[in-house]
Image: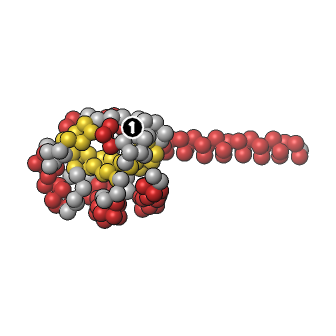
């Protein structure tokens, strides 16, 4: 009987380990990314609302934050003031680059969105979600942030706005900036 209890306990333990692992993996998959931490960030080029060309490849040597957003996204509107005040304003004079990539909206809407949100970091329209599709499944939602190190590798991915995850992202950015 004792052996049966040990077998049952071992099976239960293995089932719990598998279920926990599966749920964690499923949670990561649910974020909708097609890129992963540690991989080279896909290169792209966009034109900002100010008419400047942004090329990811030209940002090597700097820490980069890509913020995927849209005016119709309520979670984006909640997160953007935090990005502006807690990340952009304190770091914009350092080796740090931030660009908001606005999904599927025309230039005039993106400009109005930036004004309404009172953000000063650059925004760039992403027509047909072309750049978004390099990083996430086209049907996946926003808001999401991609942190890229000085060598162009992805080091952190977020989805939606979660205070704990946002604070972890800030720690990662500050850590990367403090390294020469």
Q: Quadrant of residue 115?
A: bottom left
User: Looking at the rendering, in which quadrant would you find the N terminus?
Assistant: top right
Res. 46 image quadrant: top left
Asked if 91 appears above or below 67 in the picture, the reply is below
Q: Residues within 10 Å of mark 1 (few under 14, many from 20)?
A: many
Q: Residue at x 45, y 57 (%)?
A: 178
Residue 177: x %, y % from top left? 42, 55
The foreground one among 118 and 104 is: 118
Residue at 33% x, 47% y: name it.
66
Residue pushed farthest left? 108
- Residue nearest the viewer, comparing 21 with 80: 80
Q: Residue furthest front?
A: 180
Mark 1 residue element: loop
Identify the residue shown where x is 26% and y is 52%: 73
Q: Residue 58: give x, y in percent of width and height.
A: 30, 40
Q: Can residue 115 be seen at all in this image of the molecule?
A: yes
How many numbered badges does the structure rendering display? 1
Say which quarter of the image contains residue 170: bottom left
Q: Residue at x 36, y 34 (%)?
A: 42
Query: What residue is pinned by disc 1?
Result: 41
Residue 165 at x, y percent in the picture: 45, 57
Colour setting: secondary structure
Q: Is residue 138 visible?
A: no
Horizontal and vertical percent position of residue 64: 36, 48
């Amino acid at each position: 009987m004792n052996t049966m209890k040990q077998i049952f306990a071992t099976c239960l333990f293995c089932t719990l380990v598998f279920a926990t692992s599966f749920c964690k993996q499923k949670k990561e998959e649910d974020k909708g990314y097609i890129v992963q931490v540690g991989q080279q960030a896909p290169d792209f080029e966009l034109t900002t609302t100010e008419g400047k060309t942004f090329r990811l490849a030209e940002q090597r040597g700097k820490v980069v934050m890509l913020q995927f957003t849209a005016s119709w996204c309520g979670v984006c509107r909640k997160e953007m003031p935090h990005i502006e005040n807690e990340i952009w304003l304190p770091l914009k004079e350092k080796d740090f680059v931030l660009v908001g990539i606005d999904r599927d909206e025309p230039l005039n809407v993106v400009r109005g969105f930036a004004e309404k949100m009172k953000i000063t970091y650059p925004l760039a329209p992403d027509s047909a979600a072309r750049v978004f599709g390099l990083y996430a499944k086209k049907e996946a939602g926003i808001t999401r942030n991609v942190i890229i190190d000085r060598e162009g590798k992805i080091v952190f991915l977020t989805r939606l706005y979660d205070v704990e995850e946002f604070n972890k992202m800030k720690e990662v950015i500050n850590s990367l900036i403090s390294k020469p």
